[in-house]
Image: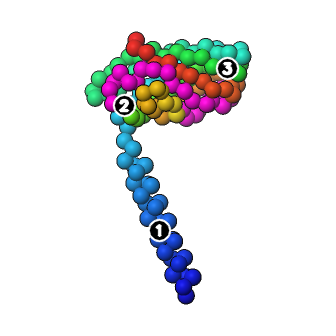
Amino acid sequence: MRLVATARMFAAAALAGGLAAAGSAMADTPDATISFGQTTIAFVGSLQWGSGTLHVHGRNIPLKISGVGVGAIGANKFSAEGDVFHLRHADDIFGTYTAVNANATAGAGAGILDMTNEHGVEIRAHATSAGLSLSLAPTGMVVKPK
């Protein structure tokens, strides 16, 4: 009988913990949205360039996107749309974003980007791509004013 009571107590605690975690995940509201596109050409190293727009507080701020990577081959284009978190000031969007990248694209593809810059700004975006490329490397993306 005591074992059943202990099991129920652990189950109730686990349920309460799960509900609390779900509540905090839902409270993670984006501060802005972003859309951007980029072209990549790679042979061992890669060059990336593109543009985008930050949508924050009714404003549309144009962005210039560039980046470099290593360990890649091929060429592709992608576009992405997503949410921006931890954006205290609109200028905090500018900076160098890092993410570990492991992907392959042949024809059309889709993926998820999750990158953070030196100001703690996080971009979580859904991307679609087209082209032919293979990459397995840490990559960086630099966002500047356009």
Left-right relation of 88 to 133: left
The numbered mark at residue 70 is 3
Q: In the figure, 5 relative to 122: above or below?
A: below
The reply to whether the magenta stretch includes residue 104 is yes
The residue to which callout 2 is attached is 87
The colour mode here is rainbow
Q: Secondary structure at mark 3?
A: strand
Classify 83 as above or below 16: above
Location of residue 141 in the rendering, given as x and y in whole percent from the top left corner: 53, 21
For badge 2, the amino acid type reads: Leu
Q: Amino acid at mark 1?
A: Ala
Is 58 covered by the magenta stretch? no
Classify 10 Å Cα crowding around label 3: few (below 14), some (14-19), many (20 and above). some
Q: Residue at x 42, y 27 (%)?
A: 119
Q: Residues within 10 Å of mark 1 (few under 14, many from 20)?
A: few
Q: What's the CA distance linking mark 2 and mark 3?
A: 29 Å
Residue segment shown in magenta:
87-113
SS for dot 1: helix
- Picture disc at residue 13: 1
SS for callout 2: loop
Question: Label 2: how many residues lie within 10 Å, few (<14), some (14-19) or many (20+)?
Answer: some
